[in-house]
């Protein structure tokens, strides 16, 4: 009886007896203790915090009987080992960004963010009601992972640059801290992608070891002080129009949970999902103003650069799809969904925001 | 011991005994049965469905012990009586749009949608992390209501018009089915707001008893066939940039719930919140295309009309604020929050959507 493995003491005996006898004593909330490895440091309190929000919902909903302890990246395993730790059962679950694991398979990025695809609302629509989570989980099952959407950052910024980037020529040879499919896209335009851990970005930019770095958005970026050493803050981060974080759960551990615990975890993940984006949306406005007040110079990527990156990203998708059938299934679904979404978003949603941003000022 | 009132049989005795003795038998999931009156008919499966999604989460999380039965508008009380039914304790809770109750107090609209204010993400940011829910609940407590955000439609459409509306002159004398603060705003520009129940909109438009009507958006509007009798479909619905639905719960009934049931209800409401918007976002794209294929003519409100409505809405806010201190507190908070939000949204979010809508086509 596998269920015994994660139950302790009297609760385990009670549930085991109940499962056999079908008695009323099988009901209620058995004690379960899980470990969650976050893909993020505690300093990213908004993303890291989403795992704590989730864990608190689960604990509160079970009278403290289902405890999920949250560990920061590096406390058990590092960011890039989190998916494998879930796969191996080292931890029961993780809260992380799928695209960190493109080294294992580029499909991992599909549920998180791929360049020039879905914004945050469209991510939720695709995942919850566009067949996205089903497709993503069909792929993840090969790695013994079951996923639930668990947060979103909204459209991220394009990052910090020591010099202005005006033309495609300015991208050639640029050493930029940027990873995954975004790095591979940039590489097609001559950028030299660099892997630099969060804590080393600032000194690398200061020394000029790198010329540019992307991180998240105003609220997180301000804390790291990049504006002091790289004054040009570009937008938008076209490689993550709406990054979805996910809870990754080991499929065996998931199957062992009583159905009502599965329901609680599912609702808590969705609650953490909407909560995290709301927190970013509440915190970013002050941060962008404070960054500008401190001398940050906001710059949009030129249409020429955006269009070249758009073409490069879709070239990359075709290349990966040629040898990776799962990726082709996922990216075809995302792109078809995106094209439908923007047909609609341009009507009511975009025209409302457009008026609120530009029209009402006149 | 009030808790007994909503518990039945053995479970009630167990919890009551537990509450006194603090014994282990107080734990677990007592039987609770609640009734929820939806503000919507079953035909609006996306909005009405959010209450069912919520109810299922609560039932599943409690092994079926906490049952919340969902009734469509009119089965117990009608849409416009739902808030009062919660206040009086006729039902334990409702799922509805606060702005239906501006007749009781215009403050009811503040948590739902007020013209030219927040889009859907900004609504969540204000409610969850901008002090919005605290302010809204401080007001609602006077009506014995505790609220939790429970869904969003996104920016709605501006509605169906039998004739084109090109200038402010065209609004004068226009009989439009539009309610609440939006109706009062329109009235300042000469529109004659009409109260017409959903089922009577079509025949009223057909007969010409009314000249225009707003409902929700493509997915819901298509079902009612308005395009056959009023071909001009205007956008955006500036009176609801992101309508938040709410769960309204009687404060006494809320206080009686065990803390872990409160946690489950809170998580389930948040889960229903993100789920409902995702469902609309997944369903609207096909509907707008099908409406256009059937002959619907999309028209944006002119900037002149938008600006005049914007000014009229803010004039209305000043008038109501002069005699209603609660409304002034709420609207001042919303407007200050909105102005900060759009400073940020215009950077990464808006420029990303702008490129995806316009730039990538070139």
Image: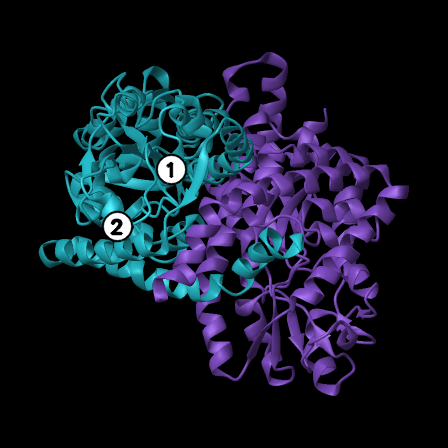
Chain colours: A purple, B cyan
Height in image: A151 above or below B90?
below
| Circle 2 crowding by C-alpha within 10 Å: few under 14, some 14–19, many from 20 | some
Height in image: B50 above or below B308?
above
Query: Closer to the camera, B142 or A73?
Result: B142
Height in image: A40 above or below A225?
above
At 57% from the left and 39% from the top, the residue drawn is A125
- Judge left or right: residue B46 versus residue A2: left
**Whole-percent x and y of residue B258?**
36, 34
- Badge 2 vs badge 1, beta-carbon distance below 8 Å: no
**Whole-percent x and y of residue A167?**
72, 74
Query: Closer to the camera, B129 or B124?
Result: B124
At 22% from the left and 38% from the top, the residue drawn is B174
Query: Closer to the camera, B169 or A30?
Result: B169
**Whole-percent x and y of residue B287?**
51, 30
At 68% from the left and 58% from the top, the residue drawn is A239
For mark 2, name the chain. B
For mark 1, name the chain. B
Query: Closer to the camera, B263 or B72?
Result: B72
- Judge left or right: residue A285 versus residue A311: left
- Marks 2/1 same chain: yes
Q: Which residue is mark 2?
A: B168
| Circle 1 crowding by C-alpha within 10 Å: few under 14, some 14–19, many from 20 | some
Which quarter of the figure is the N terminus of chain B placed in? top left
Residue at the bottom extreme? A207
Residue at the right extreme? A323
Height in image: B80 above or below A222?
above
Residue B66 seen in render? no
**Secondary element at tag 1:** helix
Residue at the left extreme? B323
Q: Which residue is mark 1?
A: B262
Numbered mark located on residue A207 in the image: none
């Amino acid at each position: 009886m596998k269920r015994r493995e994660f139950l302790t003491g009297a609760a385990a005996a009670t549930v085991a007896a109940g499962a056999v006898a079908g008695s009323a004593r099988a009901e209620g909330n058995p004690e379960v203790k899980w470990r969650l490895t976050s893909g993020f440091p505690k300093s990213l309190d908004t993303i890291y915090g989403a795992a704590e929000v989730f864990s608190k919902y689960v604990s509160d909903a079970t009278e403290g009987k289902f405890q999920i302890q949250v560990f920061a990246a590096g406390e058990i395993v590092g960011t890039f080992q989190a998916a494998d730790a879930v796969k191996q059962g080292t931890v029961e679950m993780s809260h992380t960004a799928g695209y960190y694991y493109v080294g294992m398979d580029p499909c991992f990025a599909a549920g998180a963010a791929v360049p020039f695809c879905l914004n945050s609302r469209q991510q939720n629509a695709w995942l919850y009601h566009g067949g996205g989570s089903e497709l993503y989980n069909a792929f993840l099952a090969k790695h013994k992972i079951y996923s639930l959407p668990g947060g979103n950052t909204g459209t991220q910024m394009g990052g910090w640059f020591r010099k202005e980037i005006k033309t495609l020529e300015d991208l050639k040879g640029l050493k930029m801290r940027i990873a995954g499919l975004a790095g591979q896209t940039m590489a097609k335009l001559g950028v030299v992608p660099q892997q630099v851990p969060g804590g080393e970005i600032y000194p690398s930019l200061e020394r000029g070891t790198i010329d540019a770095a992307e991180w998240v958005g105003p609220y997180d970026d301000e804390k790291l002080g990049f504006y002091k050493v790289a004054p040009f803050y570009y937008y938008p981060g076209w490689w993550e129009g709406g990054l979805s974080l996910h809870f990754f759960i080991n499929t065996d551990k998931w199957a062992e949970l009583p159905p009502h615990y599965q329901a609680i975890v599912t609702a808590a993940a969705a609650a953490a999902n909407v909560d995290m984006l709301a927190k970013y949306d509440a915190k970013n406005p002050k941060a962008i103003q404070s960054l500008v007040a401190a001398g940050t110079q906001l710059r949009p990527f030129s249409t020429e650069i955006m269009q070249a990156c758009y073409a490069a990203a879709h070239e990359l998708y075709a290349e990966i799809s040629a040898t990776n059938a799962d990726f082709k299934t996922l990216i075809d679904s995302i792109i078809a969904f995106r094209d439908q979404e923007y047909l609609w978003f341009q009507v009511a949603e975009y025209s409302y925001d457009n008026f609120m941003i530009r029209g009402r000022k006149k």
